[in-house]
Image (spheres, rainbow, N blue to C red):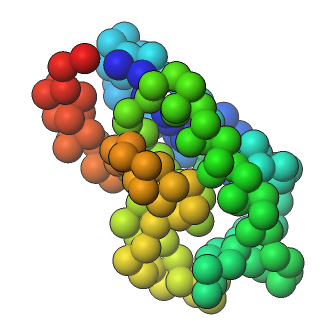
């Protein structure tokens, strides 16, 4: 199965601070042995660099901690993610939790105070709105069950 995966979960140092969030080696091995993974970082694809100033969503805009509006870059990254999924017929994504781009279900509230709200990041929402299943790394059990249950 084809799976879009947040690049940082695959160990690429693309986070705002230059780090990554690599999955456990067991999970990576399992995924790579059975599936085709498409590594993607929407913020880099949207034109931002690493390292970059952290950003959060507030009132439908993405604002970084210096007060700059980076909504356009985040939306461009989301559009590119959707285009890749459509071109490659990717139906499921494993995206990094809590990110203003990749987070599904919960993201920070835009005040840079570590408060979570029930919302999705720009890319996760774009994919969900277009019928692509989105899981995060905190839902690995249900994600792996979904993969096992899905017959191509
Ligand atoms: S935008 Fe997504 S893939 Fe890129 S660093 Fe943030 S969480 Fe990882």
Give the tally of numbered discs. Answer: 0
Q: Against 100, is 108 above or below?
A: below
**Image point 56% across, 42% down: which residue?**
82
Q: Residue furthest top?
A: 33
Q: Quadrant of the N terminus?
A: top left
**Image point 52% across, 33% down: which residue?**
85
Q: Is residue 17 visible?
A: no
Which picture quadrant has residue 101? bottom right
Which picture quadrant has residue 104? bottom left
**Image point 38% across, 33% down: which residue?**
91
Q: Quadrant of the C terminus?
A: top left
| Residue 118 spot, x, y in % from top left | 38, 77
**Image point 40% across, 53% down: which residue?**
128
| Residue 41 spot, x, y in % from top left | 66, 42
| Residue 17 spot, x, y in % from top left | 75, 56
Residue 8 horizontal side relative to residue 133, left or right = right
**Closer to the camera in the image, 134 or 79:** 79
Q: Is residue 129 visible?
A: yes
| Residue 4 spot, x, y in % from top left | 49, 33
**Closer to the camera in the image, 33 or 104:** 104
Residue 88 horizontal side relative to residue 60, left or right = left
Residue 119 horizontal side relative to residue 123, left or right = left
Q: Against 79, is 74 above or below?
A: below
């Amino acid at each position: 199965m084809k799976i879009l995966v947040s690049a940082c979960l695959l160990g690429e140092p693309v986070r705002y601070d230059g780090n990554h969030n690599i999955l456990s080696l067991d999970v990576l091995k399992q995924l790579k042995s059975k599936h085709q993974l498409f590594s993607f970082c929407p913020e880099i694809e949207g034109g931002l660099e690493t390292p970059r100033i952290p950003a959060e969503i507030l009132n439908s805009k993405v604002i970084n901690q210096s007060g700059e509006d980076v909504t356009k870059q985040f939306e461009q990254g989301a559009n590119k993610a959707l285009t890749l999924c459509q071109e490659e017929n990717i139906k499921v994504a494993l995206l990094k939790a809590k990110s203003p781009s990749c987070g599904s279900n919960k993201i920070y509230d835009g005040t840079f105070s570590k408060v979570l709200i029930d919302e999705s990041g720009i890319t996760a929402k774009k994919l969900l709105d277009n019928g692509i299943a989105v899981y995060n790394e905190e839902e690995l059990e249900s994600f792996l069950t979904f993969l096992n249950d899905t017959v191509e």
